[in-house]
Amino acid sequence: MKKKTKLNLIYVFLTAVLLCGGCFGPEQRSLPLEEPVVGKKAVLTRLSPAQYPLFSDDMLYDGLEHGILKSLEYLYRLPPDRTFTFGEDTYTAEHMIKTLDLFLSFMKTNPSRHRVRAFIEDKFAVYTYRSFEIDDEFDYEKMEADISRSISFLKKADSDKEFLFGKVRFKAGSMTKELKRFLKFLHKKPDPEHIVIHIRSSYRLYNYFKNGLPVNVLYTGYYEPFLVGSLEKDSTFRYPVYSLPDDLAVLDLSPFSERFKGEKIIGRFTDGPNFVPYYTRKEIDSDQVLKGKVKPIAWVNNKTDLFFLEIQGSGTIYLNNGQIIKAHYHNSNGRPYKSIGAYLIHTGRIPKEEMSMQRIRAYLRDHPEEAQKILNYNPSYIFFKIEEDGPLGCLNVKLTPGRSIATDRKRFPGAALAYIETQKPLIDGDENIQGWLNFSRFALNQDTGGAIRGPGRADLFWGNGNYAEIAAGYMQHPGNLHILVLKQD
């Protein structure tokens, strides 16, 4: 039997390239590449002390105490024996509380950076995400479109042009051939598990490494938007900020099978009675199926602002009567989140290298006749409630600007102390981005989001104001995410 040869499609690198703009420019090759050890499934991996990062903090620990206290607020509400998973290890809520209490007490001594690292090395276990998997909601159409664009790019290049992956070179011709082969495999619509098996058995996987650690996490940002609204509908304020509908139901699937443990579905009951998916954005916005059935918490004057309020999850509405209300996420319609940014790229409306929240806003403003169709591409819809304070994360605690992050709740322990490494924008007096600076800081895992799926994603909360909006709108940068916990006695 002939020995199977590993193909030279670098799938992980391809994904990173597509996220960073769809070109094989030098900026995408600025970090050294190494072949990582890939396990059977993605988990947090415990580092040896020699692999610990430096633990510098660009905010000089400002806001850190507030963030830690909010995580403690959440943890104190839990049973002491509630468990949290860190890779192959588990820790109780009581242990998480001890972790944060000890860390906060130490930070109040105003330690130097060297003392911080020595303290963490002595007292804390540090975990990082190092593996590779494909999310259950793998977007075949998007991946096929991305690969097709990469094939088009490679066909324009000389077939002998070489691309460097770590210490290995691959020619454009061979890369085109293997991309076509992988595209043919995707046309069969294999389930995510078989995609992973196929990639692991047939391809050599590369990843970015920095300082000996893989750069595995794509960082984006979010912020607290400000909107203008009214408690009454009129010709100016005509877009409803809907509260939770009475007919929306959440079913817990856990009693049906062990394999559904922790799984829930959202829908509504019909006269049948049948349980069906809840209305889509098109049905809610364009067909107005909730008109007269659901009371809005407010009416706003701009549907694009309302859409981005849903994306951010919470915001402040300044009412025309002088009052201010805090709109906070209550629940969704249960439909999958689809990125209108990806739609605008795939349909040729916005070049990938120009994509940002600000660019999307400009396109919708300049093409009002297309706006609703574009917004309807995302079937997910968010319903709101009024809170006295906020913005609140999924742990129902107030978020801390620059310190709170959102991750996939199924992959990372909530309320945990984290350490992040990525980039932030440098903005001039005219609010133009002049460049991106490397930064690192401690953070708290206190939120989640519909677009934050899988272990390779994290969303940083920037707060409110102009800088926060710019940073959140343009941030799409790779980095590292580490989770800290007190070592077991």
Image (cartoon, rainbow, N blue to C red):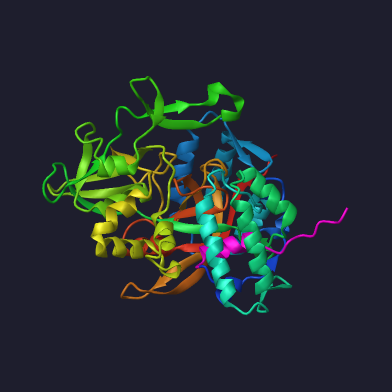
- Tell which of 483 and 35 is nearer to you: 35
Q: From the viewer's perspective, is 216 left or right of 430?
A: right
Residue 422 position (above or below residue 340): below
Q: Position of residue 387 (x, y in %)?
A: 29, 39
Query: Which residue lies at the image location 50% right of the left edge and 55% below the top edge?
Result: 142
Residue 370 lies left or right of residue 55; in this view the side is: left
Q: Quadrant of residue 370?
A: bottom left
- Between residues 465 and 181, which one lies in front from this camera angle? 181
* Residue 53 in view (yes/no): no
Residue 376: x and y in percent read 33, 49
Q: Position of residue 201 (x, y in %)?
A: 74, 52
**What residue occupies the far right of the structure in this picture?**
1
Residue 92 among magenta residues: no
Q: Is residue 199 left or right of residue 446?
A: right
Q: Quadrant of residue 94?
A: top right
Q: Position of residue 205 (x, y in %)?
A: 69, 59
The answer to whether residue 242 is left or right of residue 446 is left
Q: Nearer the viewer, residue 110 or 171?
A: 171
Is 3 one of the magenta-colored residues? yes
Indicate whether 97 appears above or below 111. Answer: above
Q: Which residues are magenta?
A: 1-21
Q: Is residue 149 visible?
A: yes
Instruction: Pick whichever, 7 or 127, lies toward us.
Output: 7
Instruction: Quarter of the image for the C terminus: give it.
Output: top right
Asked if 337 appears above or below 56 in the picture, the reply is above
Count of marks overlaid on the render: 0
Q: Residue at x 25, y 36 (%)?
A: 289
